[in-house]
């Protein structure tokens, strides 16, 4: 009788341990499947061309959709309603924006070179000051 109780107790402990193991495994698997950041990193590294193409297309569509109209309707004043509405062309200023964008891009590309040169100059100046 006592051996049956200890045996049953051992079986219950074993079942409890197995159930806890299954729960831990299930929680770990659930956490892995809900890890959105890791899934996104994996997806982007595996499909770089697709992600870059999609980003370029989305940016183009968004820029096209959010662009300003090129003409402005000038409505007459309320006192003189006999005049028709006129359309005035807005001059394009794309060249200035392009130049500023290219300058910013060139600065970003040359940033490591500039920081290395400045670091060397500061190190030389510090060495001169330390020698005196």
Image: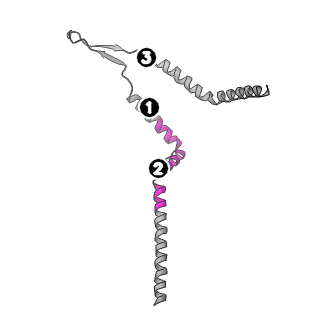
40, 56: nearer the viewer: 40
Residue 28 magenta: yes
Residue that label 3 marks: 92
Q: Is residue 67 left or right of residue 77?
A: right
Q: CA distance from mark 2 to mark 3?
A: 43 Å
Q: What predominant SS class does the magenta segment belong to?
A: helix
Label 1 crowd (10 A; few <14 / some 14-19 / many >=20): few
Residue that label 2 marks: 36
Q: CA distance from mark 2 to mark 1?
A: 26 Å
Label 1, secondary structure: give it: helix
Residue 77 magenta: no
Label 2 crowd (10 A; few <14 / some 14-19 / many >=20): few
Q: Is residue 18 above or below residue 84?
A: below
Q: Is residue 125 left or right of residue 103?
A: right
Tell me which label, 2 or 3, sits earlier in the chain.
Answer: 2
Query: Do the numbered discs 1 and 3 sit on residues whose CB atoms are within 8 Å?
Result: no
Q: In the rendered picture of this protein, how many numbered marks are placed on residues?
A: 3
Residue 58: quadrant of the picture: top left
Q: What is the span of residues highlighted in magenta in the rendered image?
A: 27-55
């Amino acid at each position: 009788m006592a051996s049956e109780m200890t045996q049953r107790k051992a079986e219950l402990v074993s079942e409890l341990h197995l159930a806890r193991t299954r729960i831990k495994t299930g929680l770990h698997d659930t956490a892995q499947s809900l890890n959105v950041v890791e899934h996104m990193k994996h997806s982007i590294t595996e499909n770089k061309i697709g992600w870059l193409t999609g980003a370029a297309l989305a940016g183009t569509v968004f820029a096209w959709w959010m662009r300003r109209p090129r003409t402005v309707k000038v409505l007459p004043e309320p006192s003189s309603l006999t005049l028709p509405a006129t359309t005035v062309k807005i001059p394009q200023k794309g060249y200035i924006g392009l130049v500023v964008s290219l300058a910013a891009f060139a600065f970003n590309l040359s940033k490591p070179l500039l920081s290395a040169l400045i670091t060397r100059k500061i190190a030389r100046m510090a060495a001169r000051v330390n020698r005196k």
